[in-house]
Image (cartoon, coloured by chain):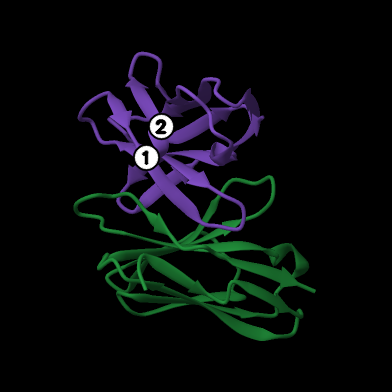
Chain colours: A green, B purple
Amino acid sequence: ETGVTQTPRHLVMGMTNKKSLKCEQHLGHNAMYWYKQSAKKPLELMFVYSLEERVENNSVPSRFSPECPNSSHLFLHLHTLQPEDSALYLCASSQEDTTYEQYFGPGTRLTVT
Amino acid sequence: AQSVTQLGSHVSVSEGALVLLRCNYSSSVPPYLFWYVQYPNQGLQLLLKYTSAATLVKGINGFEAEFKKSETSFHLTKPSAHMSDAAEYFCAVRRGYQKVTFGTGTKLQVIP
Protein backbone atom coordinates (compact mmCIF):
# COMPACT_ATOMS: atom_id res chain seq x y z
CA GLU A 1 0.00 0.00 0.00
CA THR A 2 1.13 3.53 -0.71
CA GLY A 3 -0.05 6.98 0.32
CA VAL A 4 -3.08 7.27 2.57
CA THR A 5 -5.66 4.50 2.70
CA GLN A 6 -9.13 4.55 4.22
CA THR A 7 -11.56 1.78 5.05
CA PRO A 8 -14.37 1.23 4.47
CA ARG A 9 -14.96 3.24 1.32
CA HIS A 10 -18.72 3.19 1.83
CA LEU A 11 -20.71 2.84 5.03
CA VAL A 12 -24.43 2.88 5.70
CA MET A 13 -25.43 2.94 9.33
CA GLY A 14 -28.53 3.50 11.39
CA MET A 15 -28.76 6.22 13.97
CA THR A 16 -28.30 3.75 16.83
CA ASN A 17 -25.30 1.92 15.39
CA LYS A 18 -21.66 2.16 16.41
CA LYS A 19 -19.03 1.98 13.70
CA SER A 20 -15.44 3.05 13.12
CA LEU A 21 -13.59 4.56 10.19
CA LYS A 22 -9.96 3.62 9.71
CA CYS A 23 -7.13 5.58 8.13
CA GLU A 24 -3.55 4.49 7.56
CA GLN A 25 -0.72 6.56 6.13
CA HIS A 26 2.35 4.95 4.57
CA LEU A 27 4.31 8.19 4.15
CA GLY A 28 6.12 8.46 7.48
CA HIS A 29 4.33 11.72 8.29
CA ASN A 30 4.01 13.20 11.77
CA ALA A 31 0.51 14.68 11.60
CA MET A 32 -2.91 13.26 10.69
CA TYR A 33 -6.28 14.89 10.14
CA TRP A 34 -9.99 14.12 9.83
CA TYR A 35 -12.10 16.29 7.53
CA LYS A 36 -15.81 16.27 6.75
CA GLN A 37 -16.91 17.10 3.21
CA SER A 38 -20.60 17.82 2.72
CA ALA A 39 -22.32 18.91 -0.45
CA LYS A 40 -22.24 22.66 -1.01
CA LYS A 41 -20.16 23.31 2.13
CA PRO A 42 -16.45 24.01 2.55
CA LEU A 43 -14.18 21.27 3.71
CA GLU A 44 -14.47 21.13 7.51
CA LEU A 45 -11.48 20.27 9.65
CA MET A 46 -12.60 18.02 12.49
CA PHE A 47 -9.51 16.79 14.31
CA VAL A 48 -5.74 17.13 14.11
CA TYR A 49 -3.20 14.75 15.62
CA SER A 50 0.48 15.54 15.90
CA LEU A 51 2.76 12.71 16.98
CA GLU A 52 -0.31 10.84 18.25
CA GLU A 53 -1.45 13.74 20.43
CA ARG A 54 -4.68 15.55 19.60
CA VAL A 55 -3.88 19.19 18.98
CA GLU A 56 -7.14 20.47 17.56
CA ASN A 57 -10.80 19.65 17.96
CA ASN A 58 -13.02 22.03 16.03
CA SER A 59 -16.17 21.90 18.16
CA VAL A 60 -17.08 18.51 16.83
CA PRO A 61 -20.04 16.78 18.50
CA SER A 62 -19.11 14.08 20.99
CA ARG A 63 -20.78 11.42 18.85
CA PHE A 64 -17.53 11.57 16.85
CA SER A 65 -14.56 10.21 18.78
CA PRO A 66 -11.07 10.09 17.25
CA GLU A 67 -8.27 7.76 18.20
CA CYS A 68 -4.63 7.80 17.10
CA PRO A 69 -2.82 4.74 18.49
CA ASN A 70 0.39 5.47 16.57
CA SER A 71 1.71 7.87 13.96
CA SER A 72 0.49 5.73 11.06
CA HIS A 73 -3.07 4.99 12.12
CA LEU A 74 -6.10 7.15 12.79
CA PHE A 75 -9.61 6.07 13.66
CA LEU A 76 -12.92 7.88 13.85
CA HIS A 77 -15.41 6.15 16.12
CA LEU A 78 -19.04 6.90 15.38
CA HIS A 79 -22.09 6.43 17.60
CA THR A 80 -25.68 7.65 17.61
CA LEU A 81 -25.17 9.71 14.49
CA GLN A 82 -27.74 12.00 12.89
CA PRO A 83 -28.81 12.08 9.23
CA GLU A 84 -26.98 15.41 8.80
CA ASP A 85 -23.75 13.56 9.55
CA SER A 86 -24.00 11.89 6.16
CA ALA A 87 -20.96 13.08 4.20
CA LEU A 88 -17.60 12.12 2.77
CA TYR A 89 -15.04 11.75 5.56
CA LEU A 90 -11.50 12.38 4.45
CA CYS A 91 -8.31 11.51 6.24
CA ALA A 92 -5.07 13.34 5.49
CA SER A 93 -1.48 13.37 6.68
CA SER A 94 1.41 15.81 6.49
CA GLN A 95 5.00 16.33 7.54
CA GLU A 96 4.74 19.56 9.43
CA ASP A 97 8.39 20.49 9.84
CA THR A 98 9.37 20.25 6.18
CA THR A 99 6.87 20.12 3.35
CA TYR A 100 3.52 21.15 4.94
CA GLU A 101 1.20 19.95 2.21
CA GLN A 102 -1.46 17.43 3.14
CA TYR A 103 -1.94 14.10 1.42
CA PHE A 104 -5.48 12.78 1.36
CA GLY A 105 -7.02 9.35 1.36
CA PRO A 106 -9.92 8.46 -0.94
CA GLY A 107 -12.50 9.03 1.77
CA THR A 108 -15.34 7.08 3.34
CA ARG A 109 -18.81 7.88 2.03
CA LEU A 110 -21.04 7.70 5.10
CA THR A 111 -24.81 7.53 4.92
CA VAL A 112 -26.82 7.70 8.13
CA THR A 113 -30.35 6.35 7.83
CA ALA B 1 -7.40 35.48 10.00
CA GLN B 2 -6.37 33.73 6.84
CA SER B 3 -8.92 32.68 4.26
CA VAL B 4 -9.37 31.94 0.58
CA THR B 5 -12.07 32.93 -1.87
CA GLN B 6 -12.65 31.03 -5.08
CA LEU B 7 -14.58 33.02 -7.63
CA GLY B 8 -17.08 30.88 -9.50
CA SER B 9 -18.37 27.59 -8.18
CA HIS B 10 -18.68 26.27 -11.74
CA VAL B 11 -16.50 27.00 -14.77
CA SER B 12 -17.03 25.59 -18.27
CA VAL B 13 -14.40 25.60 -20.98
CA SER B 14 -14.12 23.97 -24.38
CA GLU B 15 -11.59 21.23 -24.92
CA GLY B 16 -8.33 22.89 -25.98
CA ALA B 17 -9.23 26.26 -24.46
CA LEU B 18 -7.44 28.07 -21.65
CA VAL B 19 -8.37 27.08 -18.13
CA LEU B 20 -8.39 29.88 -15.54
CA LEU B 21 -9.58 29.21 -12.00
CA ARG B 22 -9.46 32.14 -9.63
CA CYS B 23 -8.32 32.21 -6.03
CA ASN B 24 -7.83 35.20 -3.77
CA TYR B 25 -6.44 34.91 -0.29
CA SER B 26 -6.23 37.03 2.80
CA SER B 27 -3.28 36.55 5.05
CA SER B 28 -1.53 38.57 7.70
CA VAL B 29 1.76 36.80 7.04
CA PRO B 30 3.48 35.53 3.90
CA PRO B 31 1.30 32.59 2.98
CA TYR B 32 1.79 29.06 1.87
CA LEU B 33 -0.77 28.42 -0.87
CA PHE B 34 -1.95 25.21 -2.49
CA TRP B 35 -4.16 23.97 -5.27
CA TYR B 36 -5.79 20.56 -4.98
CA VAL B 37 -7.92 18.59 -7.43
CA GLN B 38 -10.68 16.15 -6.55
CA TYR B 39 -12.07 13.66 -9.03
CA PRO B 40 -15.46 12.04 -8.33
CA ASN B 41 -15.43 9.61 -5.43
CA GLN B 42 -11.81 10.33 -4.63
CA GLY B 43 -9.83 12.33 -2.12
CA LEU B 44 -7.97 15.56 -2.80
CA GLN B 45 -4.73 15.41 -4.76
CA LEU B 46 -2.08 18.11 -4.56
CA LEU B 47 -1.60 19.93 -7.88
CA LEU B 48 0.97 22.50 -6.80
CA LYS B 49 2.11 24.67 -3.91
CA TYR B 50 3.64 28.09 -3.31
CA THR B 51 6.06 28.43 -0.40
CA SER B 52 7.65 31.86 -1.01
CA ALA B 53 10.17 30.72 -3.60
CA ALA B 54 9.38 31.35 -7.28
CA THR B 55 6.14 33.25 -7.86
CA LEU B 56 5.25 31.10 -10.87
CA VAL B 57 4.66 27.57 -9.70
CA LYS B 58 4.37 24.60 -12.01
CA GLY B 59 2.39 21.57 -11.00
CA ILE B 60 1.25 18.25 -12.32
CA ASN B 61 -0.89 17.66 -15.41
CA GLY B 62 0.28 20.89 -17.07
CA PHE B 63 -1.19 23.25 -14.48
CA GLU B 64 0.57 26.29 -13.11
CA ALA B 65 -0.28 29.15 -10.77
CA GLU B 66 1.15 32.58 -10.24
CA PHE B 67 1.44 34.21 -6.83
CA LYS B 68 0.68 37.94 -7.05
CA LYS B 69 1.15 39.65 -3.73
CA SER B 70 -0.20 43.00 -4.92
CA GLU B 71 -3.45 41.36 -5.98
CA THR B 72 -3.49 38.76 -3.19
CA SER B 73 -4.20 36.19 -5.87
CA PHE B 74 -3.06 32.69 -6.74
CA HIS B 75 -4.96 31.82 -9.90
CA LEU B 76 -4.63 28.39 -11.50
CA THR B 77 -4.14 28.11 -15.26
CA LYS B 78 -3.64 25.52 -17.95
CA PRO B 79 -3.08 26.52 -21.59
CA SER B 80 -5.19 23.77 -23.14
CA ALA B 81 -7.99 21.91 -21.37
CA HIS B 82 -8.35 18.16 -21.70
CA MET B 83 -11.48 16.16 -21.02
CA SER B 84 -9.61 14.48 -18.16
CA ASP B 85 -9.30 17.86 -16.39
CA ALA B 86 -12.99 17.80 -15.49
CA ALA B 87 -12.98 17.74 -11.69
CA GLU B 88 -13.36 20.00 -8.68
CA TYR B 89 -10.46 22.26 -7.77
CA PHE B 90 -9.72 23.65 -4.32
CA CYS B 91 -7.46 26.52 -3.36
CA ALA B 92 -6.05 26.42 0.16
CA VAL B 93 -3.94 28.59 2.44
CA ARG B 94 -1.83 27.39 5.32
CA ARG B 95 -2.80 29.44 8.35
CA GLY B 96 -0.33 28.10 10.87
CA TYR B 97 1.04 24.93 12.28
CA GLN B 98 -1.05 22.06 10.97
CA LYS B 99 -3.88 24.37 9.95
CA VAL B 100 -5.04 24.77 6.38
CA THR B 101 -8.15 26.63 5.21
CA PHE B 102 -9.75 25.43 2.00
CA GLY B 103 -11.85 27.39 -0.44
CA THR B 104 -15.32 26.27 -1.39
CA GLY B 105 -14.14 24.69 -4.62
CA THR B 106 -14.67 25.26 -8.35
CA LYS B 107 -16.12 22.53 -10.54
CA LEU B 108 -14.53 22.52 -13.96
CA GLN B 109 -16.54 21.22 -16.88
CA VAL B 110 -14.75 20.55 -20.17
CA ILE B 111 -16.97 20.60 -23.24
CA PRO B 112 -15.90 18.47 -26.20
Can you give x and y, in whole percent of width and height, for residue B32 in the image?
Answer: 31, 37
Disc 2: which residue: B63
Q: Amino acid at mark 2?
A: Phe
SS for dot 2: loop
Which residue occupies the extreme right position in the image?
Answer: A113
Can you give x and y, in whole percent of width and height, for residue B95 in the image?
Answer: 36, 42
Q: Quadrant of the C terminus of chain A?
A: bottom right
User: Gap in Å between the C-alphas at discs 1 and 2?
Assistant: 6 Å
User: Along the line of sight, which residue is nearer the eye, A82 or B89?
Assistant: B89
Compared to residue B8, the image places residue A103 above or below, namely below
The chain identifier of the residue carrying mark 1 reads B
Q: Residue at x 38, y 27 (%)?
A: B65
SS for dot 1: helix
User: Along the line of sight, which residue is nearer the eye, A76 or B54?
Assistant: B54
Compared to residue B86, the image places residue B52 above or below, namely above
- Mark 2 crowdedness (10 Å alpha carbons): few <14, some 14-19, many ≥20: many
Q: Residue at x 41, y 38 (%)?
A: B61
Disc 1: which residue: B60
- Mark 1 crowdedness (10 Å alpha carbons): few <14, some 14-19, many ≥20: few
- Whether pointer 1 and pointer 2 mark residues with C-beta atoms closer than 8 Å, the reply is yes
Which residue occupies the extreme top position in the image?
Answer: B70
Q: Is residue A14 left or right of residue A33?
A: right
Q: Is residue B98 left or right of residue A92?
A: left
The chain identifier of the residue carrying mark 2 reads B
